[in-house]
Image: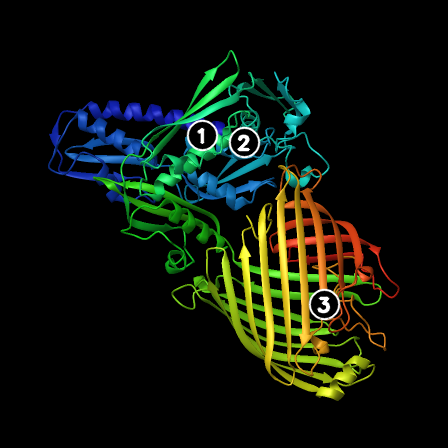
Amino acid sequence: MTINSFRLRSVAAVVSMAFAATTAWAVNPFTVRDIRIEGLQRVEPGTIFVSIPVRVGDVYDDEKGSSAIRALFGLGLFKDVRIEVNGDVLVIVVEERPTVSEVDFVGTKEFDKDVLKKALRDVGLSDGRPFDKAQLDRAEQELKRQYINRSLYAAEVVTTVTPIERNRVNLTFSVIEGEPAKISEIRIIGNTVFSESTLRNLFDLDTGGWLSWYTKSNRYSRSKLNADIETLRSYYLTRGYLEFKVDSTQVAILPNKQDIAIAINVTEGERFVVSGVTLEGNFLGKDDEFKSLVTIRPGEAYNADQVAETTKAITDYFGNFGYAFARVEARPEIDRTTNRVALVLQAEPSRRAYVRKINVVGNNRTRDVVVRREFRQFEASWYDGDKIKLSRDRVDRLGYFTEVGIETQQVPGSPDQVDLTLNVVEKPTGSISLGAGFSSGDGLGLSFGLKQDNAFGSGNSLGIQVNTSKVNRAIVFNTTDPYFTQDGVSRTIDVYHRTNSPYQDQSYYQLVTSGGSVRFGVPFTETDTVYFGGGVEKTTIVAGTALPTSYLNYAEQFGYSTTAVPLTIGWSRDRRDSALAPNSGRYQRANAEWSVAGDARYVKATYQFQQYVPLNKQFTAAFNAEFGWGQGIGDRSLPVYKNFFGGGLGSVRGFEQGSLGPRDSSGVVIGGNRRVNLNAELLTPFPGAGNDRTLRMYGFIDVGGVSGSDGVNVNANDLRASAGVGVSWISPVGPLRLAFATPIRKFEGDKIQTVQFQIGTTF
């Protein structure tokens, strides 16, 4: 059956309804003895009896007949309704609309069919529902809207209605998607201070590059264009152009429906300099404290970001004293003759409030207590803006949610009370880490790790690492309870078994290490944590072919099997803006290990420092420094298997992993008791990826080295160095870094590895 035939039948139904109404009115009023219904197939009779305004025993007249017909047509279940009178019996004859049996799509490549079916359900068209031509029209428009949102303006939708048995129909939407419309031109008109190319570089939308297939930056999106316009406005407002405005925006789709031209008309206005800042209103008698929050400096260009930061800082500071509804307004007083502006900060603290209730929404998997224990703002306490912000940040730092936001609602009828609602959006908290490296000598080496940071929504983490290579076999299990005590002391348990062999031939010597440890973390501040713990470890040197001289000497002196009881203490401070893709902030950690009992007596210490400096919107400078030191205690030397090694990812890229360090008389790398690593990177969005920071490239320089024995410092003449480029990608399985490195300072015998990659690491 074609759509035209359905249109004809719809017209016929309307005519039939009018005729039925006419016949219904052409009767004299009478008392209804019985009501019969004819023509029902799937609709329950009760649906009709409930809908009509006539009951057995009522007096039937023209008005009730008309109302009954309108009510039944209004159900949307019937395409024809007639009322007939047989003596004092009322006969309602209906013809049901066909039911949609199946909805199918042909030619849809851009969308999954389930996505389109959900979109059609939202407009009332789905399997099992009555078929309505008006809904079919809405469905076609909805499908076209979905494609327009993906810049597929040339998409065409043709609907086929196929009647089948039992008054049902199948609907088939045939879609010709066409090619997506792409931005062919972006013009900014009216600019004189900044060049058009400079302003276009601020945009996420562009006219395309060789990587546009991934970024889709040349596909038009209204929301993205609005965001770019806001970026443009912010660029001017932060440089003194107080009266900058966007006059109009034209988006033109060319007749071929494949190209889009965008024109943005702007008026820059004059550049204004701040002449002064004054405070007016009620500042709780703490004017000096509030003045210290002002970042706007007289003599500098007007900066809208500084104004917004200042007003927010003042508002938040009011919140620290319980004034949740404080209003702070920055009122500019413009002198156009001198192009100067005086800013007046008007404050009204309103009334003090306390928090009645805290609600958590969106944690479908994570237990409520896991979120609430991070809160520093408590119920029935005075509203404190600092504690609320800290609470939000602590929940965000858990890493369990993609979005974390707090809303403040006033309690109706209680002007001094507020409710807080924490809205979270959960994300998968499992991660996979993979590591690989390739060298001509050893071929490809692989490692695998699996970690669940929020196991069963408890906030505890479980992890396992497995390496099945013939050279380095290992299995490591660890678990962390971040709230082992109610005060936030964490507990970490590690159990491990490792086997290291220099070659794939198992006849060569092996180093077998088994042990376990427990570590506690005590938070001293919101960013500082101190760790302490202890463990037991047993290391066995399995003699075999090519046992290095250093291992043989150690075994002969202290035995082939030695035990150690190391105690550990550490400290970390994390002030980065992100753990996955940091752009600013600093990270530090220090750790000391002291073996107080057993056959092996030693002390080891490490320190790491990272600094991220945003140079502008696109470039970030990153620096990393690591230092390691170890020494034997008393008459014992540092166990040879506790030595530091260098080379590879996390050290000096371009050299094989763990291949840098002193060698013994047999020529085997045995490492040393001192290590230095220095790394510098310059990160920038990948060419063609716009300002997308999930895919970036970087250039780097690495310098590092390992010293020989106790008391010998690292010699600068022995340091290795490399330089290269790499790619950083926040992939679905974790951050991936691929490095292409070339040694710029190397020595004879060094093992070179020019291509290295790893998932789940930073430097």
Could you say where residue 196 lies in the image, as x and y percent from the top left? Answer: 66, 22
The span from disc 2 to disc 3 (Cα, nearest Å) is 51 Å
Mark number, residue 674:
3
Could you say where residue 285 lies in the image, as x and y percent from the top left? Answer: 32, 36
Quarter residue 320 falls in: top left
Question: Disc 3 or 1, which lies upstream in sequence?
Answer: 1
Mark number, residue 6:
1
Relative placement, left or right, of 557 versus 118 is: right
Could you say where residue 556 lies in the image, as x and y percent from the top left? Answer: 76, 88
Question: Disc 2 or 1, which lies upstream in sequence?
Answer: 1
Labels 2 & 3 near each other (Cβ < 8 A): no
Q: Secondary structure at mark 2?
A: helix
Q: Residue at x 60, y 53 (%)?
A: 732
| Residue 244 seen in this snapshot | yes
Quadrant in the picture for the C terminus: bottom right
The amino acid at mark 2 is Ala
The amino acid at mark 3 is Arg
Q: Where 90 sits versus 554, above or below?
A: above
Question: Disc 2 or 3, which lies upstream in sequence?
Answer: 2
Q: Which residue is mark 2?
A: 227
| Residue at the far right in the pictured view | 748
Give the mark toward the camera: 2 or 1. Answer: 2
